[in-house]
Amino acid sequence: MASIARKNLFEDIPRFLVAQAGIMFAVSLVTIQLGILKGFSRSTAIVVDHTTADLWVTSQEMVYFELTSALPADYLTQAEKVSGVDRAEVLLLRSGRWRDANGKLAPVRIFGFNPDGQLFAGWKILQGKIEDLKQPYTVMLDQDSRRSLGLQQLRDQGSIGFLPATVVGFLDDVQSNASSPFLFASLETANAYGTAELSSSITCTRQSNGELNCTNRFQNRPLGQKIGEIQPPARLNLGDPITYILIRAKPGENLDLLKQRLRDALPGTEAYTRKEMAALTRNYWEERTGVGFILGLGATVGFIVGMVVVGQILYSSVADHIREFGTLKAMGASNWVIYRVIIEQALWMSILGYVPSILLCVGLGHWTQAAKGVMILIEPTTAAGVLVLTVVMCVGSALFAVQKVTRVDPAIVFKA
Amino acid sequence: MTAIDFDQIQRPGSLSAATVTPCRESLLQDALTQKAIAACGVSMIYQTGTQAFHALKNVSLTINAGDVQLLMGPSGSGKTTLLSILAGILTPTEGRVCLLGEDITRMSSRQLAEFRLTNLGFVFQGFNLFPALTALENVEVALHLKGIKRQAARRQAMELLEQVDLGNKANNLPRDLSGGQKQRVAIARALAGNPKLIMADEPTAALDSQNGHAVIQLLRDLAKEGGRTVLIVTHDPRIVEVADRVIHLEDGILQS
């Protein structure tokens, strides 16, 4: 049959375009909200995702990836001795204040790892080499963090506390949208940055009259160190706190049993698989912070707006063509034939609204990622989900419009 | 299909040669076996709040197969209501209607829809063409509804348009056709699937004299060629000459 639905749709092009604009608005709103939620959620644990460790050992007080208590460094050697552990590496997580070349401050999170290691690896390096981090006081960072840290290119410098920091590499897709910029450094450098804040000393001298004269002195370098003299970072020692121990299990090892053995061997710790660690972190941001709710609410509002827009459009379209539907009924068409016309019209509207909207959102996502470092993640599953939602939205609205046709009196066809 | 329950119908009167006849058993028997259309004691009351309006009062009539029958009367006389009832679109408050020997007043709405689809073609005063579809597609839609497949439907639709002399306008949209041409498309659509009954509501009302006459002549020719029964509601006296019979309706009552 000639598609009455399609022909009705294209009969009035300006009206069709207005209708499609409404649907595109709704679809884009839903897609962007879901994309931001997905992108945000993904970014919060992107560092975890990139690693190759089977297990993460951390304090049992850990709330999420970036909020945990320290472990003693000698846990590393104990972990290495646990049966089933093939390799163990330390990961440090420190906070610091970055000062750029113009003196502007920014908070940073500093990851310290072994550049020769195998478990905190798998980065997409855009410029530089991981080996460059073996040089003292060098860092790598996500390219999207450059602007916020006042950096432009390799070898640009800033400082953390009283220590210099030279950029030796740029990475891609490692920054959490929820956090301060991440810096990646060697264990020694990261450890040094973690304590490179102001130091103070009190010097007291007794005056001739017997009074004590004390001077409290603050300086932005270690005590005893002269201005301009920077010592290389010290090696990590057993007294230093560490944040995580990354574990690679021996081939075929049961991870659940290994987790239990690690918990037993390292009191006060908890072991998570990489997936668990990532899920725990994402869950924290999505649920405990309300971010997931807010973005989910936005998507829901988009869906409702879409329903209303499409419903109104279809309802008025049905009203405009009510005599035609009445004619069909008078000719003997069943209600189902008419429903099919309206539902087909809704499906056309959903597809023709969906395709440009998704393309628009993908383009927008690329732009926000490049320009603002904010990811709008539209995975195939998200796109498919939005397509289903769009179809449901349009067909649901069509069912609303169908009510009008169901009640149409076929006798209207005899009214001039 | 449902047969008439004769025991339920007890109405006085005598059967005459005229189309306007009282209703009784023998008439109904005839209707079942011989008449294309038979209405028996049909009344229609529209209720508006506490007001009741009697649009039709005890109307009985029969129409022979192959006749072109005019139903005339002034505005508000109940012509369109009677047509709607005879077409199975409205259900009368009272009375029975038989089409092609079947009592349509006893059918469910689904059965009625199927009956209309199979046996009836409609021509409307306002044409009621689908404005977004071409002339050919307008006719195709009716054929598709009757279950005819795409290729066959296209071919038959073209043949029907050629029958009404519009083969060269097949791809025109209704807005590109004159009033007379639109009505001819509507007639082609009404003929889709070769129905035995054609119901036309004021088919010439929106047409000038020449076009009106041409449309009525066309309806008559098609009826005679195909042995169809055509019931035309009109108040246009110019077309009386083409009718086999004329019945008048006034204030909801048939005048013989």
Image (spheres, coloured by chain):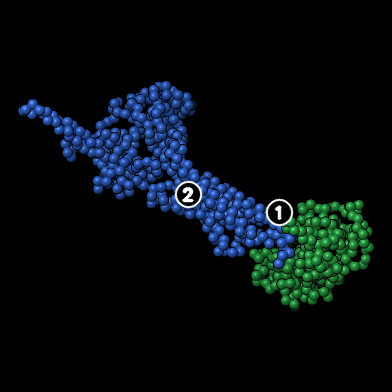
Chain colours: A blue, B green
Relative to B30, is B219 above or below? Answer: below
Q: Chain of mark 1?
A: A
Q: Residue at the location (23% across, 38% down)?
A: A162
Left/right of residue A411 with respect to residue A123 in the rendered view: right
Residue under pointer 1: A335
Crowdedness near tag 1: few (<14), some (14–19) or many (≥20) residues, C-alpha within 10 Å: some
Q: Secondary structure at mark 1?
A: helix
Amino acid, disc 2: Ile
* Residue A179 image offset from top left, x and y in percent: 37, 41
Q: Residue at x 47, y 49 (%)?
A: A32
Judge by depth and name the residue closer to the eye, A412 or A21.
A412
Q: Residue at x 39, y 48 (%)?
A: A373
Horizontal and vertical percent position of residue A30 = 51, 49
> B38 or A30: nearer the eye?
B38
The residue carrying mark 2 is: A32
Q: Amino acid at mark 1?
A: Asn
Secondary element type, mark 2: helix
Residue occupying the far top of the picture: A264
- Give the quarter of the figure containing the C terminus of chain A: bottom right
Q: Is residue A213 above or below residue B228?
A: above
Q: Position of residue B98 (x, y in %)?
A: 85, 58
- Say which label, 2 or 1, has the lower sequence index: 2
Using the numbered discs, state the Cα–Cα distance from disc 2 to disc 1 in whole angstroms: 38 Å
Give neighbour class at mark 2: few <14, some 14-19, many 20+ (Cα, 10 Å): many
Q: Chain of mark 2?
A: A
Between disc 2 and disc 1, the foreground one is 1
Along the viewing direction, whichever of A287 and A259 lies nearer the viewer: A287
Q: Taking A304 as reference, is B65 above or below it? A: below
